[in-house]
Image (tube, rainbow, N blue to C red):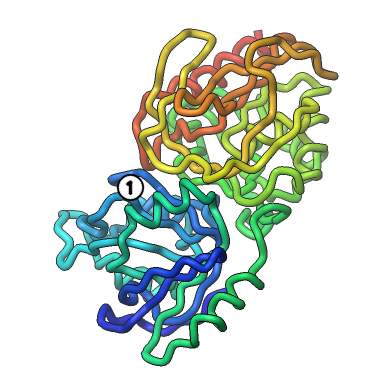
């Protein structure tokens, strides 16, 4: 929930966590009130892609980088049609952006889209608090006449929690659309949009794939109506424990043996489809500098992440599933969280992180080639 008017940096603001901790600062972006789940992102660049990532729906993002807004806002880098974060927290906003592609300031863009933010906050102290206590509900209140502290805290504690939230249909496309292949068309992929980022179908299009992006509510019949060579399940917000419909569709794909690739939420959907559980991480992985090992090759990648839930699968053994053998293919080197799954008897795999690299490093771009190889093998 957000109410807002255009902001002014001298307007007072306060950030209130559900455990009672408060941080005072100044309005950044829109002036008003907003609620969400407080999370932190460790990326030093790529704030525009972060803001427009649908996976951040209903989350208030704390930027650990102290200086934000340096390059302004351009018209080329958004990952969707709008900003999705529920609120934005920065320490030291840039006074004047400097970049040849910049069209407007970050402050102005947040205000124009009604996103309530706060600046002048000790984001290091706030991040340490979230690491110790875990992600939690938060409110940002800004204006010249703020409620008393007790009232603000009560409102924060009435806000919905992320656990149990079913959000993918709120951010996904309502109508199917097609991203054409770049150059010669080699394959057709049906992509189930659970909160897809714009760069993901583009990465497939670069490899000669025509991508049919379908709503989160698409049925298995609608998926196969496009005669796909492969099926893709995207990233997205919310608790994977609520995603019964995508799990059902994915099980049909697995039964038919169609090459399958999932990213982020799609990885959690695959985990559930195989019979594994999911759970909420204490504070999640968000940013563009997370180390992951591809256990199939031993290679270590620096990767982009945005997830607060993970798959509960055994790291050190091959599991028997209704669709054959499965194993953990990727693992986070910081905390041993499952970062990828693959089937050994069917053409299906997924990763928890973001190989489309928007924003982020390109270490994991090979995963799109791996998907192409699965479709080539199936066709052969």
Q: Residue at 68% across / 52% down in the picture?
A: 163
Location of residue 258 in the rendering, given as x and y in whole percent from the top left corner: 73, 22
Q: Residue at 44% across / 33% down in the picture?
A: 182
- Callout 1: few (<14), some (14-19), or many (20+) C-alpha neighbours within 10 Å? some
User: What is the secondary structure assignment of the residue under circle 1?
Assistant: loop
Residue extending furthest toward the bottom: 145
- Whether residue 154 is visible, yes or no, is yes
Q: Residue at 31% across / 61% down in the picture?
A: 122
Residue wearing tag 1:
46
Location of residue 11 in the rendering, given as x and y in whole percent from the top left corner: 31, 83
Vertical position of residue 103 compared to residue 322: above or below: below
* The N terminus, quarter of image: bottom right
In the picture, measured across the screen, residue 242 lies left or right of residue 170, that is right
Location of residue 43 in the rendering, given as x and y in whole percent from the top left corner: 34, 44
In the picture, measured across the screen, residue 171 lies left or right of residue 86, that is right
Q: Nearer the viewer, residue 121 or 259?
A: 121
Q: What count of labels does the image hold?
A: 1
In the picture, measured across the screen, residue 207 lies left or right of residue 342, that is left
Q: Residue at 56% across / 14% down in the picture?
A: 373
Vertical position of residue 324 compared to residue 256: above or below: above
Q: Nearer the viewer, residue 302 or 349?
A: 302
- Whether residue 375 is visible, yes or no, is no
């Amino acid at each position: 929930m957000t109410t807002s008017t255009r902001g002014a940096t001298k307007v007072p603001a306060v950030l209130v966590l559900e455990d009672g901790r408060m941080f005072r600062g100044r309005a950044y972006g829109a002036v008003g009130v907003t609620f969400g789940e407080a999370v932190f992102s460790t990326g030093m660049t790529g704030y525009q892609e972060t803001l427009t990532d649908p996976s951040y729906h209903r989350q208030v993002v704390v930027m650990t980088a102290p200086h934000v807004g340096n390059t302004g806002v351009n018209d080329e880098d958004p990952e969707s049609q709008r900003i999705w974060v529920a609120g934005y927290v920065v320490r030291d906003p840039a006074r004047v952006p400097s970049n040849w592609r910049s069209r407007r300031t970050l402050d102005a863009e947040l205000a124009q889209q009604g996103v309530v933010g706060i600046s002048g906050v000790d984001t290091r102290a706030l991040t340490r608090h979230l690491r110790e206590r875990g992600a939690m509900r938060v409110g940002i209140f800004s204006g010249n006449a703020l409620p008393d502290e007790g009232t603000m805290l009560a409102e924060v504690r009435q806000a919905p929690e992320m656990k149990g939230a079913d959000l993918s249909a709120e951010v996904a496309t309502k109508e199917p659309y097609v991203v054409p292949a770049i150059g010669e068309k080699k394959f057709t992929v049906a992509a189930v949009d659970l909160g897809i980022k714009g760069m993901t179908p583009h990465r497939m299009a670069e490899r000669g794939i025509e991508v049919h992006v379908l709503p989160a509510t698409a049925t298995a019949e609608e998926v196969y109506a496009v005669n796909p060579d492969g099926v893709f399940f995207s990233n997205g917000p919310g608790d994977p424990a609520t995603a019964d419909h995508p799990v059902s569709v994915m099980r049909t794909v697995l039964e038919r043996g169609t090459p399958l690739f999932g990213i982020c939420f799609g990885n959690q959907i695959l985990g559930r489809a195989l019979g594994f559980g999911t759970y909420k991480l204490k504070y999640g992985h968000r940013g563009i500098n997370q180390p992951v090992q591809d256990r199939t090759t031993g290679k270590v990648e620096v990767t982009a992440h945005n997830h607060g839930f993970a798959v509960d699968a055994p790291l050190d053994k091959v599991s028997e599933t209704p669709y054959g053998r499965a194993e953990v293919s990727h693992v986070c080197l910081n905390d041993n969280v499952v970062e990828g799954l693959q089937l050994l008897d069917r053409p299906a795999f997924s990763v928890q992180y973001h190989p489309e690299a928007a924003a982020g490093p390109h270490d994991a771009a090979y995963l799109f080639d791996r998907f192409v190889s699965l479709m080539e093998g199936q066709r052969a």
